[in-house]
Image (cartoon, helix red, strand yellow):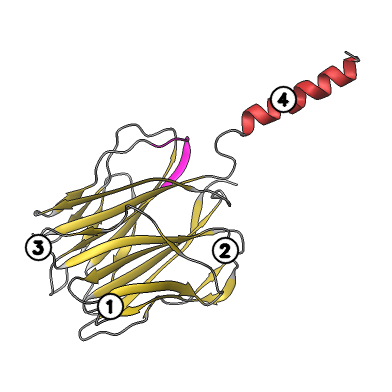
Amino acid sequence: MALSVPHFTFGGSFTPGAFPLTTTAISTTTGNLSVVGIRLNDGGPAITSVTDTAGNTFNPIAGSFIRDNSSNNNTQLYYAINITGNASNVVSVNGTGTPSFSAVCAWEIAGADRSSPLDQVVTGDSATTTVTSSPFTTTSANEIICAIGTGNNGGGQTFAAQSGYTFDGNVGPAGNLNSGAEHLIVSSIQTGVTTSMTASTTAPTVISVATFKQAGSGGGSQVNWVNRHRRFVNKRGY
């Protein structure tokens, strides 16, 4: 199955906020991948867990946490593999402290590897409107790149996707959209590329990026060749 994004959802809290941060409900399918992007204000709130209605286990993506250069907000990514589906699934970010001007978003991804989908993880920060990640190189041809970008603007700001990317939307609480999400599905190995987003106003801005492999990526072709060779040898009676 080719990679795709059947659903995307988001939510957040204004100020003063409170945990849990929750997304709007979506219908999810068993076996898919769920990727969660989170934006928090610095100096108080801390994540204790990410859960959902279906009871899936979400793990933090190491290396995805980044704090802006004014130390006022941060982003990070979580994911759950081979999920259990639910007809009205809500993702919840649980924690301690007061999560003012926070945001949470979730991609449901079909066609991802069900055991070890995570490939590359990078971040980036900027003091201008455009924030760009560090360069990365994928290890397989068919992958999806997911990114959340956020800025330090208490009055809210909107984002635009990098050229060629699908813009999933501006995310955050109603009346204070403060982050943006995007994704790109590729069919060739990406070498030394970067991912970026552009904010509507100038402010310290950060981006968290992760790539995920399609099911069957890497190693399968050699196994199939060996099996075909064995069948040929047995048929010929060698």
Q: Earlier in the sequence, mark 4 or mark 2?
A: 2
SS category of the residue bearing label 3: loop
x, y percent for residue 189: 42, 33
Find residue 226 and name its label. Answer: 4
Spatial CA distance of label 2 from label 1 is 26 Å
Find residue 83 and name its label. Answer: 2
Write the residue at 16% across / 60% down: 68
Residue beneath disc 1: 173
Query: Disc 2 residue type?
Result: Ile
Write the residue at 37% across / 74% down: 48
Find residue 78 and name its label. Answer: none
Q: Earlier in the sequence, mark 1 or mark 3?
A: 3
x, y percent for residue 205: 16, 58
Q: Earlier in the sequence, mark 3 or mark 2?
A: 3
Mark 2, Cα crowd under 10 Å, few <14 / some 14-19 / many 20+, is many
Mark 1, Cα crowd under 10 Å, few <14 / some 14-19 / many 20+, is many
Q: Which residues are magenta?
A: 138-144
x, y percent for residue 192: 30, 33
The quadrant in which residue 157 appears is bottom left
Q: Would residue 143 be counted in the magenta stretch? A: yes
Query: Disc 1 residue type?
Result: Pro
SS category of the residue bearing label 2: loop
SS category of the residue bearing label 4: helix
Spatial CA distance of label 4 from label 1 is 54 Å
